[in-house]
Image (spheres, helix red, strand yellow):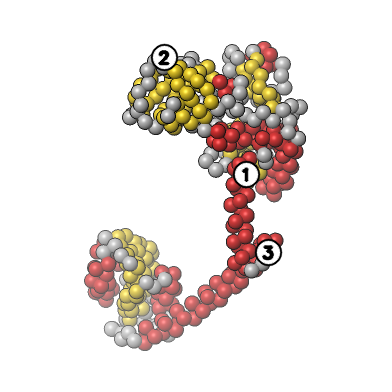
Amino acid sequence: MTTNLYWRDSHLTKFTARVVDSWTHDGRRIVVLDQSAFYPTGGGQPCDTGMIDSVRVIDVESGKDGRVLHQLSDDVSFTAGEEVECEIDWPRRREMMQQHTGQHILSQAFFQLFGAETRGFRIADHSTEIDLTLEAQSDEIEQTVVRAEELANSVVFENRDVRIHEVTPEEAARLPLRKESFVADCIRVVEIDGYDWSPCGGTHARRTGEVGLIAVKSWERAKKMTRVHFVCGVRALGDYRSASRTADAIARRFTVGREEAEGSVVRLMEENKRLARRVCELAEVAATVEAQELLAATAPVNGLRIVSQVFENRDFDELKLLAHRLAHHPEDADGVIVLLATKEGEMARLVFARSANLSADMNALMRAACERLKGRGGGTPDFAQGGGSDVGELNSALAAAMVIAQAS
């Protein structure tokens, strides 16, 4: 079994140890030490990284026999009994300590204020998540989160002591633990002075002030619980810088101060909605006019007009609108069959439509055309759409569809 040095001192970054065992697995060297300050992945917290002698430690895991397995970046040989110098990657350790201690503080805030228990915890790449038994409605969540965030940060700013205790199960039973421990022998308990007691094997700050700041980024309903995403310390600083750069960039776009940027964005979005509605209205008018021109240029055969046209890079929504206008033109009582297509790079997209008084099956026509184009499509007897990648067959596919339509 490896002696876990971080249990008593999470700020320990340099230590000497002896190699107990060493082997190669999948081209990587695995090293077991008699003692280690490297935190192995577990309990929602990622592992430490660092160096053993001059070789980088890229992953750390707990073995079934209580040994800590250090995976190295290179397959460098180590001998049992060899003494090695080890160093923890301190910026990463500090970041993990801030997130984990911050989690204890925030979890206790939700429990103290709302009785919400933490049922899940994960430190992800960019934020930390906790799953809470919080039943607040969506319109109440924001106020709930703000209250918990404020309490958590007041504990951070008070710079309270964080103490580590190793106790027996009997001793643990007499402590006001926020959650139950399932460890059968020695239990490690993290105490935040006058605020929280929690069994935990992770790395933690010595005082709450080291957490720096706790900032909730977002929340969502997940698996009948509330999932809260937050950042602490150096991550909170990085998040602030990113948000600040974005806010400044938006403000510069509108040539206003940051405090005025939101109003400018709202006005722009409203204007965009009005313009989009106007574009739709004009598209309707343009489609009607274009349909009239295409019908006028198409001679009827036995009273039936078949409009077949290939466009280059035509907006597909516009193409569908044009097909509808052609098929339902009020001045053509005998009926119209519409076979339209557009070339979009290496893809061809098609729209087939017919007047309601005709019997030709657009769905069947479309499937046959798309088969030629090495694609697929379908729809209803009066309207269908599809496409394919064999653009070279587009003209022949439309010609074949026209022959079938004339015969139907």
Whether the residues at callouts 3 and 2 have beta carbons within 8 Å, the answer is no
Q: Amino acid at mark 3?
A: Gly
Instruction: Give the residue displayed 72% in from the left and 28% down from the top.
Output: 161
Query: Up-down: is 333 above or below 108?
Result: below
Q: Mark 2, residues whose alpha carbon is within 10 Å: few (<14), some, or many (≥20)?
A: few
Label 1: which secondary element: helix
Name the residue nearer the viewer: 381 or 239: 239
Q: Which residue is label 3 attached to? A: 257
Q: CA distance from mark 1 to mark 3?
A: 23 Å
Query: Up-down: is 173 above or below 220?
Result: above
Name the residue nearer the viewer: 124 or 227: 124
Q: Quadrant of residue 211?
A: top right
Mark seen at residue 81: 2
Task: Please state the horizontal and vertical placement of residue 222, each as a whole percent of the image.
Answer: 58, 41
Q: Earlier in the sequence, mark 1 or mark 3?
A: 1
Instruction: Give the residue displayed 52% in from the left and 75% down from the top.
Output: 279
Q: Quadrant of residue 180?
A: top right
Q: CA distance from mark 3 to mark 2?
A: 65 Å
Q: CA distance from mark 1 to mark 2?
A: 43 Å
Whether the residues at callouts 1 and 2 have beta carbons within 8 Å, the answer is no
Query: Up-down: is 298 above or below 38?
Result: below
Q: Amino acid at mark 2?
A: Gly
Q: Mark 3, residues whose alpha carbon is within 10 Å: few (<14), some, or many (≥20)?
A: few
Label 3: which secondary element: loop
Q: If the image is split into quadrants, where does the C terminus sit? A: bottom left
Instruction: Give the residue displayed 58% in from the left and 39% down from the top.
Output: 128
Mark seen at residue 236: 1
Task: Please state the horizontal and vertical placement of residue 15, each as a whole percent of the image.
Answer: 52, 22
